[in-house]
Image (cartoon, grey):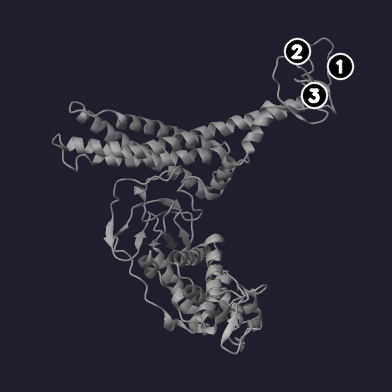
Amino acid sequence: TEERVKQFQYITTFSPSGVSGVAELGVMDSDEEYLYDCDSGNESSGDDVGLDFDIEGDAESGSSKYRDTEDYPYEVLSTEDITRHMIDCIKEVNSVVNIPVTTTRILLNHFKWDKEKLMERFYDGDQEKLFSEAHVVSPFKATSKSPKVLVKTSNGMEECEICFLNMPSAMMTGIECGHRFCTSCWTEYLTTKIIDEGMGQTISCAAHSCSILVDDHTVMRLIVDPKVKLKYQHLITKSFVECNRLLRWCPYPDCNYAIKVQYPDARPVMCKCRNVFCFNCGENWHDPVKCHLLRRWIKKCDDDSETSNWIAANTKECPKCKVTIEKDGGCNHMVCKNQSCKADFCWVCLGPWEPHGSSWYSCNRYDEDEAKQARDAQEKSRAALQRYLFYCNRYMNHMQSLKFEHKLYASVKEKMEEMQQHNMSWIEVQFLKKAVDILCECRQTLMFTYVFAYYLRKNNQSVIFEDNQKDVESATETLSEYLERDITQENLADIKQKVQDKYRYCDQRRRKLLEHVHEGYEKDWWEYSEP
């Protein structure tokens, strides 16, 4: 952990007076970084599952670069790389404004690391208001470092207003606002703020009602535990990335890399952990569905909207008191169990029971407007539920299958080794890995086509889309079946030919499906419903 903290020494080691106090950053591990091909990305949108095979690419020094077929360049940044970007940003601003580096960092965070906005406010003539809003003491105003709340005795001792112990002045620490406390109390206060409350950028002075922020230099000097230092540095780095529209953390669990782009867009990016995700929304890459539709779908799956649909489709409200009732018997004569209501009504038409006479098990009032409206509302809810379940089931089925396909890599690797023992070269058995790659790509594409289809309104182009979807789905299932067959010496040649033919067809049809959808985006073919 100590080595990790040493490696992460960055802006917090700046001297308060300027950039000259910057310590050298630790050198990042010499991991090779690659130029990835976006079509090699295979990951599940359900559980994030890493692949066991290396992705081919050209090694290069520095940050890993990626370009898809439409030339979308980006960099994969380590924590050290992010720190360098922070330092560069601070240096750039500080070279103009000429204020303490820690103050510059706090001001940049206040403006969400928007350098232009900070510069504009800094030179608009009201700097005192700017510093006040950012909760820092103006570096241009002479401030008394002598605290008003502490008692200094003649023997050089000071009383800490937190623990009320008399301490030597050398054991007391103050910040720009003038408040001073003992080192032990400062350390405990800062540790609580960082570890328990997760605060990094906005830790205020420990004095009551003082809103001045504690600078980075002071925090790093007072914190002793390397783990707390590392957490503090992580919180500052995290805030820097989250505030920057050109940066995004990789969403894969426990991954500490971020992606830096030249301009934000809904494009696939691949992290060094090989997780492929959409830079715009941070979800797993979801072509062909747009980000806003995917957000609606995820929200719909997460909330209770479909529970409400089920209730609407399978229950009715008492026409008098509106209590929800579920029918549990065959008789259509309903008596509300609400003690303050006890209404008698017909389950079929929801009308009063008295006019029904002896029609105990049937209702001849189907055409009444009020009853018809009630039935129509229930039918709409039932139809909406059935439609949602149709698309949701297929979406979930492909997600589940995708998880199984990722596990298929292990068995395919064994088959490849076994086939090499039957006088086949390493190159000759690579068709199996290629087949699983394409199978996973098809599964993921199909999964998100059902989200797209759920919101899509019917027209001539949507019929073509559904035909393409059906074709890809059928071919994908056939390819999956081929890959799960046992391979013997006798059927090896036949299986190889079938697998190669089928994965080429799957890949071709998947690309055609996506091309058709993207052509529709360009030509405004698609209209969306509001289910």
N-terminal of the two: label 1 or label 2?
1
Residue 336: mark: 3
Q: Determine whether the residue tagged by mark 3 lies in a helix, strand or loop.
A: loop
Q: Mark 2 points at which residue?
A: 362
Camera-nearest label, 1 or 2: 1
Q: Which residue: 50% across, 80% down?
A: 101
Q: Which residue: 43% across, 60% down?
A: 258
N-terminal of the two: label 3 or label 1?
3
N-terminal of the two: label 3 or label 2?
3
Camera-nearest label, 3 or 2: 3
Q: Name the residue under label 1.
A: 354
Q: Visible in this render: residue 512?
A: yes
Residue 346: mark: none
The image quarter containing residue 133 is bottom right
Residue type, label 3: Cys
Quarter containing the N terminus: bottom left
